[in-house]
Amino acid sequence: MTDESIGQQVVTEQSQQTMKKYKIEHDRPNCIGCAACAAVAPDFWTMHEDGKSDIVGCKKRDDEWEELDIDEKDYAVNKEAADSCPVNVIHITNKETGEKII
Ligand code: F3S
């Protein structure tokens, strides 16, 4: 393997790690603690002692929303969680197209 091809391999692996296809966002201030998200997608949503949910491993923003980038394989279960939320505080964006799915 040449130095150049090793370099390309590193770049490819880095971009696969950072280029997750979807972003999930949680409008936590408006979460009413219904817990449907945690029931539907417990690997991604957990209930906090204040009665609201958290995205597991998320980045917390200054506006108290939470966000997490996810792979395509994790889209369906999070879409189901978003669909199950009665107050629509879970949002999903396709990062490649900018489409706001929910
Ligand atoms: Fe909150 Fe909706 Fe989950 S209200 S606890 S984000 S189902």
Image (cartoon, grey):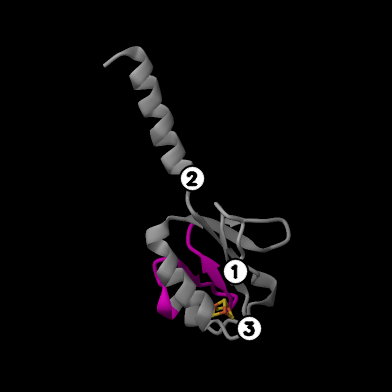
Extreme residue toward the front, this view: 97
Residue 41 on the magenta segment:
yes
Q: Quadrant of the N terminus?
A: top left
Q: For the residue marked with disc 1, what is the amino acid?
A: His
> Residue 87 got which mark?
3
Q: Is mark 1 within 8 Å of ligand 1?
A: no
Task: Give the residue at mark 1.
Answer: 91
Estimate how packed mark 2 is, as few (under 14), some (14 to 19) or many (20 or more) residues with alpha carbons within 10 Å. few
- Gap between marks 2 and 3 measured at Cα: 29 Å
**Residue at x-position 63% and y-position 75%:** 89
What stretch of residues is rendered in magenta?
A: 39-57
Q: How many numbered discs, if any?
A: 3
Q: Is mark 3 within 8 Å of ligand 1?
A: yes
Label 3 – label 1 distance at C-alpha: 11 Å
Residue at image position (36%, 27%) is: 9
Label 3 crowd bin: few (<14), some (14–19), many (20+), radius 10 Å:
some
Q: Which of the numbered marks, if any, corresponds to residue 99?
A: none
Question: Which residue lies at the image location 42% right of the left edge and 58% below the top edge?
Answer: 72
Q: Residue 13 in the image: x percent, y percent?
A: 39, 35
Please state, as top left, top right, bottom left or bottom right, where the C terminus lies in the image.
Answer: bottom right
SS state under label 2: loop
Label 2 residue near ligand 1, CB within 8 Å = no
Give above or below for 14 relative to 7: below
Image location (x, y in percent) of residue 23: 55, 58
| Circle 2/circle 3 CB separation < 8 Å | no
Q: Earlier in the sequence, mark 2 or mark 3?
A: 2
* Residue 87 painted magenta: no
* Label disc, if present, on residue 19 of the rendered structure: 2
